[in-house]
Image (cartoon, rainbow, N blue to C red):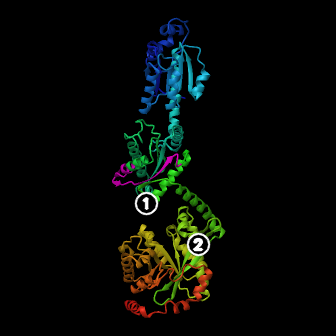
Amino acid sequence: MSCTKETAIRVLVADDEAEVLDAYKRILEKPSFFREAGRHSLGDLRAKIFGGGKRESGAPCSTPRFQVEYTRSSREALQAMKEAWERGVPFHVAFLDMRMPPGPDGAWVARQMRAIDSTLDIVFVTAYSDMDPQEISGQIPPADKIFYLQKPFHPHEIRQLALALGCESSEEAKIRELAYYDRLTGLPNRDHFTSRLLQAIELARRQKRRLAVLMLDLDNFKRINDTLGHNAGDRLLRIIARRLTASMRCSDTITRLPLGKDHKDLARLGGDEFMILLSEVVKNEDAAVVANRIGKVLCEPVPLGEDEIIVNTSMGIAVFPEDGEDAETLVKNADMAMHLAKKEGGNSFRYFSPSLNVAAGRRLKLENELRRALHRGEFSLWYQPQIHSFTGELLGMEALIRWQSPALGMVSPMEFIPVAEECGLITSIGQWVLTTACAQARTWRRKEHPLKRMAVNISVLQFLQQGFPQLVEKILAQSGLEAEALELEITETMLMKDADNSIQKLEALKSLGVSLAIDDFGTGYSSLSRLKDFPIDRIKIDKSFVHGISSAQNEKAIAAAIIAMGHSMGLHVTAEGVETQDQLDYLRDNHCEEIQGYLISRPLPPCEAVTFLKNRNTLQAGRFRRISRDSQCLKGSLHRK
């Protein structure tokens, strides 16, 4: 290893004899003395330092810079080691006298030092020949970091050992910096943190005490990168790292860290994820104290150039030993708890619970099965009728996906659709749904079944997909279904995320001749000023408002307002989730002309849907033959039109 004059090699010397310490000073701190030593014989040097000896020739040497601290006992040396470590300026090499009466010997202090810094090079210097190097190395591993020097020593021996070991230690430190520290924030990385966690778990196990790990993730960090740029994102991460470090330097024993650089208990795992080790928790609630404090520190406004942003965080906590007895399990469980906090809206923390493990196992099994379901033909479409609320006329069918898994049984769309969106399968599944629904509608219409339209739900990722209008056009052409017989249902929330882009997509779809509906209307907080700009044909009242009609006055008022607003904008209005006669009566009273729900029919497999289509006249003659009660409503509806 090379070492320049500018390299500061930090050396710790421990010897109980003042004359020997003075010799170290002359060798390491006074180049003139060392140059003189190069011109004198070994005997002269021995005579100068210890007295006596034979003259031998010497050789000059280079003069790098040493930073040396001198101590007179083992305990002084250990204290100096601790203080240097806490300041973040550890020693590269230590020269220890083997015997320093009346205190502990060099082997004792070496063991204590090794517990603090496993990379320190230790040189035992002794005038005694009864020391067994192999035995000492076995007691103070690693053996390749232990060296021995016999007194009386030559200046070259001290200087060259200090130079060689110090330079090697400096180079190793640089390598460790690259391997174990995050270059952006300067914090320990995942590997470094894992090593520290392993040590902490072993110590906690021996001492029969708790520790906790806290996983932290910034909410909506991707949006900051996308809107302000990656440079701004990097600046934010550095600021967050500094704030976390400062918050971990508080006086309480839960998170107290040394003032040096090597904060092993705080790490950046990657991206916007950080991990904190709480090695001094007494009870589980201690971790919540830290989480709350961190949340308050990080939510302070962050200046990024001309912008100022508020950062929210989601945190997950796992406690040793109840939540895991090894590092991998603890980190995994803290990560699951953090994702639960994020799923519940973020800006909070959650403790791990065994139920999360069960849910995670189910989630993994579901994703694995889902990846094969489409190729295995496990999906099917069921169809729910949409009818005129006054006449009972069948107006359309909504295609609803169902999944019968051989391994999991019948899986609810409420469970597998979000998973399909997260793992990128929703576009291929959605394309299958659209293709199958169009083909089925075409088949029914060819057989003269009176199906006016087929409604198909479109996912967010489908709608955002490049070339989606062209895909719809292609599927219509392949199936032979007329465009006016297809209605695409798009959620209100999806449209409002990027209203301008949504309008362009909707206009492209509208130009094909298909009908467009806003699904789950009333749940997405639409701006009415933007709603009028969307080229839509229908709004569908979310079933949560329909269910409340029977019992809650607010839901009644909201449903009535949506119906009136839709009609005032020239839109058709369909109520979803109609299950009772009272709900139907209220919707009729408020002139809602189309309904869908279990009162009419549950979703039907294709064979039963055909039967429903064939028996539509019976339906009209039955449940909807009673028009007398609703004649005034019907007249009012016709009058408005």
Q: Is residue 2 visible?
A: no
Q: Secondary structure at mark 1?
A: loop
Q: Position of residue 325 (x, y in %)?
A: 55, 45
Identify whether 545 is placed above or below 196. Answer: below
Which residue does the image show at 54% across and 48% down from the upper left?
324
19 inside magenta stretch: no
> In this rendering, is residue 138 above or below 44?
below
- Residue underneath mark 1: 345
Which sits in the foreground, 450 or 48?
450
**At x 43% / y 26%, what residue is drawn?**
79
For residue 386, say whether it is visible: yes
Neighbour class for label 1 at 10 Å: few (<14), some, many (≥20)?
few
Q: On the image, numbered disc 2 is attached to which residue?
A: 402
Asked which quadrant contains residue 247, the reply is top left
Q: Which residues are magenta?
A: 294-323
Residue 307 in magenta stretch: yes
Q: First in sequence, mark 2 or 1: give its number.
A: 1
Amino acid on which disc 1 is placed: Gly
Q: Are marks 2 and 1 in contact (CB under 8 Å)?
A: no
**Place of residue 597 in the rendered image (x, y in percent of width and height, measured from the top left):** 50, 80
- Whether residue 598 is situated above or below residue 22 in the rendered picture: below
